[in-house]
Image (spheres, rainbow, N blue to C red):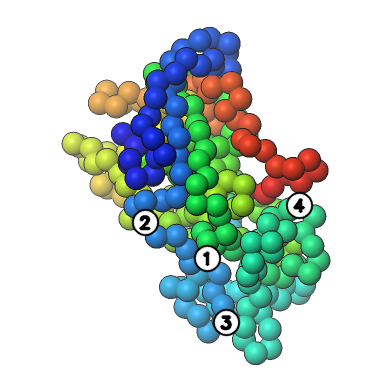
Amino acid sequence: MFLAAGLAGPVQEVPCTLESGESTTCLRIARKSVPSDHAQGPWCPKSVHDGPEAGGIWPEAGTAHDVTGEFIANLATFYGDSAWALHNEDGTINVTDTAEACAAAARPDVDPALHNHCVECLPTYLARDTVVETLIPKLPTRAKSPSPIRSNIGLALNGVEFAAPAPTHAILAAHTLAPFDDCGGHINMHDGYHYHAVTSGCLTSIAQDDAHAPMIGYALDGYPIHARAGHDGAEPTDLDECRGHMDDTRGYHYHVAGPGKNQTLDCFTGEIVQGAARRPPGPPPGQPPRE
Ligand SMILES: [Zn+2]
Ligand SMILES: [Zn+2]
C-alpha cells in the first residue's frame, strides 16, 4: 500500500500496544522521509521580481498564498507590522543558505541575525540514509473519545509524514516565513521532508470506483486518509470534529482540510500506538524543534 521507493524495507507486522493499553498488531513502516513521487521545493524566492514558480505557499487565515517576490516585499502591509523586511534595497531576499542557518532559524529562540529571513532547509542538508520508523495499527480501533493531534498525523502513500501544524505564531514572531513547497511540504533537520498541507496533483493517490475523493494515506490510528474533495469538488458535509465520516463502501475514513489551514486533520478518532504522538528521535535538551 505504501510506495516501495519511499521505504527502507518491507512493511512488517509487529506486536504493539495502543494508548488504551490494549495489545494489537501494528505495521512497522521504515520510511525515508523523501517523496519519491514528486520534486521537493522550491520554497523561498530569491528576488522580489520572482514569480510563483520560484517559491512555495504560506498559509494565513485559511488561504494558501503563493510566496512570490511580491508577496515577500509586501509582508509589512500583509501583516500590518513595519518590522517585516525580508527584502533588501537591491531587490534580493534574505534566505537561509546553510544547514546551520536553517537549523538555527528553526529554534524557538531564533538568532536575531536570522530574523527577517525566508527559511528553507534544502534536501542536500540531510543525511542520505535517514530512516524513521512509524507504527500504525493494522486494524483501526475506535477510541472512546477523540484524541488531540500532538505530533505526527499520519503518512502519505510515499511514506512522508503529515506533520502537526507548523507553529506559525513562533515563525511569524521572528519575522520569518518557512514556506511549504507547492506540494505542501518542507524540510527540517530533525524530521526531514514533511507535509503541513495537501495540495492537488502532487500526492500519489488511489482512485475510488465512485466519485468519492481518492485515498492519499493513513492516519496514525490506521484509518485511511482521503483528499479533501471528490469529483464534485466539494468536501463532504457530514465530517465529524476530526474530519472523518463513514460510508458503506469505505467504512470510517478522513478527508484532509484545504492547504490554507496548516492542519490536515483535527484529531484522531481511533486509538494510536503508545508513544506514537511523541517525536522520535527528539531534539537536543532545551532545543525543541519547530515543525
Ligand atoms: Zn469520504
Ligand atoms: Zn514543518
CA neighbours of label 3 inside 10 A, class few (<14), some (14 to 19), many (20+): many
CA neighbours of label 1 inside 10 A, class few (<14), some (14 to 19), many (20+): many
Under circle 1, the secondary element is loop
Q: Which quarter of the rendered picture does the N terminus lie within?
A: top left
From the viewer's perspective, is 193 left or right of 222? right
Which badge, 3 or 2, comes first in the chain's sequence? 2
Whether residue 180 appears in this view of the structure is: no
Q: Which amino acid does label 4 sit on?
A: Pro
Residue of label 3: 48
Whether residue 287 appears in this view of the structure is: yes
The location of residue 17, given as percent across then percent down, is 54, 15
Residue at image location 55% in from the left, 52% down from the top:
127
The location of residue 63, given as percent across then percent down, is 52, 58
CA neighbours of label 2 inside 10 A, class few (<14), some (14 to 19), many (20+): few
Q: Which amino acid does label 2 sit on?
A: His
Residue of label 4: 108
Residue of label 2: 38
Which residue is situated farthest in the bottom direction here? 90
Q: Residue 43 carries which label?
A: 1
Residue at image location 51% in from the left, 10% down from the top:
23
Is ligand 2 less than 8 Å from the beta carbon at label 1?
Answer: no
Q: What residue type is labelled 1?
A: Trp
Under circle 2, the secondary element is loop
Q: How far apart are marks 2 and 1 (CA)?
A: 14 Å
